[in-house]
Image: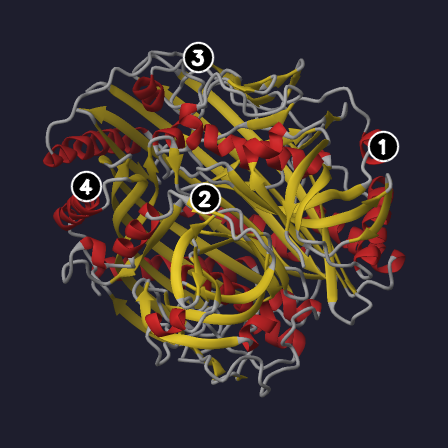
């Protein structure tokens, strides 16, 4: 056997959904298990069980080895020499003491009642509270022995109003952070200014006009720049996708963005502070380090696992992560950020004669070609340097390389969030961050 | 079903008794035992054999109209008792809502699909797939994929006498990859589905795999339309799935309770082209005809020749809104039409065959815009070049009305059987 890892993994999740004061979901789940993955004769074997005791570990270890051996039926295969990295340590976030479901419901009900009283013109208010806590004890045949925990909490607040045409319009605010729901301040007094803004935006959307389809100058708000980092260039810089044929494979050392753009997949610490999804060692026990994906506009390196690092001759980044106890590690992003520049958002808007200010996104998708898409749920026209009318929901797309090469201003602020899931074969908790960017991009519309 | 089923039944019964003992007015318990074997492919090579086995309990309890639920992967008595005690506390703190209730007097015994996986069959189908790729579509890189057998036995009991058991096994395949030539790549493309068997045909003849691989090779060289126009789209089954997903969302609890469903008041009305019918397929491979809230799910028609027949609230959603309860499981059939695909494409003067719609969530009123990926231009009734950087915009609800033709061919992906659909009046940019 060339390599073996075993993982005891517990995933605790909580999710509550309140629709207009009606608690339609009030759930907690715990998934517990042990898994093992073995590399033998050039093939991998994986096995998992709910039993995370010694007997379970022994059972899955034997199962993983048998599975790897069974793959020999496909014929002899060269065995890669996997990188050796070893990490020993414990990294457990020390947040506030967890609150019970009762307190979550109480906070939710208080917020729902406050919204109903403060915004009587809304058709509907939906609240989602959720947190999840991954605790993993990993050992590897390379000598790694790591206890790591990742915790994130989130709140989605969705306002639905009726537009001037009688049709519903809605907009969502996400609030997220490291830790459990105890670590988020969801009191109405803390959220009042954010929610007043959200209300103002949903009213504006009620009068929104259609975007003019085509290529435009756009100012991407910080929330969108994080998504751009993740979707547009993050995925094409995952080594397994590069091996799969992503065009980035042939672009290392070449200019893929304006020299104002630097993009990093941060392992655990950014400018001295621990990030939202800190990975000190990945689920292969590889010490995690930052992956400098783009430096001053030049494509620099890719995120990798032990196997993809070996296949491509790369220095390991510690990017192999598994979501469920029954999942095998895959190459995943951790905390992907476009580094802030020196511009000011208001100056960036003032410099646009005819374009759009894109503020919120619902979701996004990447592609091997670097042609990306994300849905825009809040945006305004920019006319003669001033914010104009709201526009209806639309989509922004383009070649990430062309868009990033067109960046002519990067703001000096930075917005992080960890409110979504990245989707691959498995979901994954990630964070993304960015400043505002000004660029040329294609907008869907009439 | 034998001793193993009895064990699962005993586990559920014991948990239900414990919940009653803890003071719940009503309760629903589901015990689950699942197993999976999966041969994975990475970068055109077999890479991994993955086996998993899990047991879990799902518990839902009501007290004074207040509800909470939990799911645990440990089933030892002491742990479950502790979790039930904390669930009681969770429920007691929830708001009172008379709409909360559990199902009563429901009964089902379902055994469906292959109960045991054949690992040699999984390996053989993986080999067939890889051989086909190498022989027929060598520019295609299968970035990841799998051939899988999964099996799940569930037993659900409620305090109101419901007793539903299912043992469902199925095979599934998934293929995801990119075609590449020199420095050029196609977009990602993917397909897959579930089936009760994988033995009757070569692997590439399931779930539209061969066509997906061949189409993707033709999508390495792409170009944009280069102009704005209003034209037609021919949605492939993969894109039809997005349209179906949006429609089903409009019929469910969240939109109905919030009052934001576009169809809340539309039962009995024409909401789509008379060509469109959407029916349940609750006996599809991998599907058990049992709803999440413990109801047996008889067959249901959602749209019949363009007329909305039924919404789909859960028991809770029904009691909350007064809308008729329609229990649903997870299988759907967009009924195939009478027109060959070639005739459908031949009828389009200017438009596109849309392989995949890459878009954000449609707006609350159904408006959307999205990039069409894995797509081909149609000019003068002929499918021509592969498209790049092309967006379409329209409205989901209007698209259902603007259906011009539905193909007689369909792809059976298991939980969804979907045809090709031609829709008019989309804005291209």
Residue A88 placement (x, y as % from top left): 44, 12
Residue beneath the point at 29% across and 70% down: B110
Please tell me if label 2 and label 4 are on a single chain: yes
Circle 1 packing at 10 Å, graded few (<14), some (14-19), many (20+), is few
Q: Which residue is mark 1?
A: A346
Distance of label 1 from label 2 (alpha carbons): 56 Å
Front of the two marks 1 and 3: 1
Residue B78 drawn at (x, y percent):
44, 44
Q: How does the figure colour the protein chain or chains?
A: secondary structure
Residue B79, labelled with which disc?
2
Q: Calculate the distance from the C-alpha at mark 4 to the C-alpha at mark 3.
A: 43 Å
Report the front residue among B373 and A129: B373
Read off the residue under disc 4.
B134
Q: Quadrant of residue A169?
A: bottom right
> Quick one: which residue is furthest to the bottom in this view?
B268
Any mark on residue A439, and which? none
Please report, as a chain letter, where disc 2 is located: B
Quote the CA–CA distance across marks 1 and 3: 47 Å
Read off the chain for label 3. A
Give the residue drawn at x 54%, y 74%.
B400
- Identify the residue under disc 3: A88
């Amino acid at each position: 056997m060339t390599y073996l890892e075993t993982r005891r993994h517990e995933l605790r999740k909580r999710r509550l959904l309140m629709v207009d004061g009606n608690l339609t979901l009030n759930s907690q789940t715990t998934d517990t298990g042990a898994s093992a993955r073995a590399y033998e004769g050039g093939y991998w074997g994986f096995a998992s069980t709910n039993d995370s005791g010694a007997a379970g570990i022994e059972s899955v270890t034997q199962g993983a080895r048998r599975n790897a051996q069974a793959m020999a039926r496909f014929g002899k295969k060269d065995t890669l020499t996997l990188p050796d990295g070893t990490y020993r340590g414990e990294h457990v976030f020390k947040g506030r003491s967890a609150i019970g479901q009762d307190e979550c419901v109480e906070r939710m009900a208080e917020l729902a009642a406050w919204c109903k009283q403060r915004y009587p013109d809304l058709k509907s208010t939906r609240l989602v509270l959720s947190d999840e806590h991954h605790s993993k004890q990993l050992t590897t045949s390379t000598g790694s022995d790591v206890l790591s925990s990742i915790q994130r909490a989130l709140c989605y607040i969705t306002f639905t109003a009726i537009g001037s045409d009688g049709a519903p319009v809605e907009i969502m605010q996400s609030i997220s952070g490291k830790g459990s729901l105890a670590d988020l301040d969801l009191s109405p007094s803390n959220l009042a200014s954010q929610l007043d803004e959200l209300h103002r935006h949903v009213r504006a959307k009620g009068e929104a006009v259609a975007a003019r389809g085509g290529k435009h100058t756009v100012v991407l708000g910080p929330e969108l720049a994080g998504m751009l980092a993740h979707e547009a260039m993050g995925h094409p810089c995952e080594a397994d996708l590069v091996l799969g044929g992503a065009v980035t494979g042939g672009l290392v050392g070449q200019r893929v963005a304006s020299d104002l753009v630097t993009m990093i997949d941060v392992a655990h610490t950014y400018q001295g502070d621990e990030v939202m999804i800190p990975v000190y060692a990945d689920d292969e026990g590889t010490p995690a380090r930052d992956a400098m994906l783009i430096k001053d506009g030049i494509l620099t390196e890719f995120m990798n696992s032990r196997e993809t690092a070996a296949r491509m001759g790369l220095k390991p980044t510690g990017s192999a992560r598994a979501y469920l106890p029954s999942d095998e590690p895959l190459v995943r992003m951790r905390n992907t950020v476009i580094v802030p520049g020196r511009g000011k958002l208001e100056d960036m808007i003032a410099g646009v004669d005819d374009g759009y200010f894109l503020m919120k996104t619902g979701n996004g998708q990447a592609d091997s070609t670097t042609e990306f898409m994300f849905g825009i749920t809040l945006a305004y026209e920019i006319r003669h340097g001033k914010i104009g009318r709201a526009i209806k929901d639309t989509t922004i797309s383009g070649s990430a390389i062309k868009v990033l090469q067109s960046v002519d201003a990067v703001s000096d602020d930075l917005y992080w969030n960890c409110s979504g899931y990245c989707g691959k074969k498995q979901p994954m908790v990630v964070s993304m961050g960015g400043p505002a960017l000004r660029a040329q991009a294609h907008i869907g519309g009439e | 079903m034998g001793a193993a089923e009895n064990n699962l039944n005993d586990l559920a019964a014991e948990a239900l008794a414990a919940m009653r003992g803890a003071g719940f007015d009503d309760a629903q318990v589901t015990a689950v035992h699942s197993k999976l074997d999966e041969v994975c492919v990475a970068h055109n090579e077999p890479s991994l054999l993955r086996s998993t086995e899990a047991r879990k309990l799902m518990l839902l309890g009501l007290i004074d109209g207040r509800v909470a639920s939990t799911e645990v992967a440990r089933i030892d008595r002491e742990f479950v008792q502790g979790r039930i005690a904390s669930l009681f506390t969770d429920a007691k703190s929830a708001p009172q809502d008379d709409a909360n209730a559990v199902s009563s007097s429901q009964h089902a015994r379902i055994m469906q699909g292959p109960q045991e996986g054949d690992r040699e069959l999984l390996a053989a189908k993986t080999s067939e797939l890889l051989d086909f790729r190498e022989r027929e579509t060598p520019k295609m890189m299968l970035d990841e994929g799998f051939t899988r057998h999964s099996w799940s036995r569930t037993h659900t009991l409620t305090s109101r006498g419901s007793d539903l058991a299912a043992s469902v096994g199925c095979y599934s395949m998934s293929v995801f990859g990119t075609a590449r030539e020199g420095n050029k790549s196609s977009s990602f493309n993917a397909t897959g589905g579930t089936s009760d068997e994988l033995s009757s045909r070569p692997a590439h003849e399931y779930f539209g795999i061969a066509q997906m691989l061949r189409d993707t090779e033709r999508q390495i060289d792409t170009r944009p339309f280069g102009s704005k126009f209003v034209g037609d789209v021919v949605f492939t089954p993969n894109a039809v799935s997005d349209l179906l997903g949006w429609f089903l969302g409009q019929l469910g609890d969240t939109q109905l309770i919030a009052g934001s469903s576009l169809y809340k008041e539309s039962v009995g009305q024409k909401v789509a082209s008379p060509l469109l019918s959407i029916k349940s397929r609750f006996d599809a491979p991998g599907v058990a005809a049992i709803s999440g809230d413990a109801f047996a799910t008889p067959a249901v028609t959602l749209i019949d020749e363009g007329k909305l027949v039924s919404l789909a609230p859960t028991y809770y959603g029904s009691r909350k809104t007064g809308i008729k309860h329609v229990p649903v499981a997870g299988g759907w059939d967009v009924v195939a039409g009478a027109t060959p695909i070639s005739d459908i494409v031949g009828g389009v003067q200017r438009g596109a065959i849309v392989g995949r719609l890459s878009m954000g969530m449609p707006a609350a009123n159904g408006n959307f815009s999205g990039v069409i990926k894995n797509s081909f231009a149609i000019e003068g009734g002929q499918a021509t070049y592969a498209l790049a950087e092309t967006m379409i915009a329209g409205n989901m609800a209007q698209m259902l009305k603007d259906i011009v033709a539905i193909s007689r061919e369909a792809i059976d992906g298991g939980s969804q059987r979907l045809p090709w659909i031609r829709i008019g009046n989309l804005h291209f940019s």
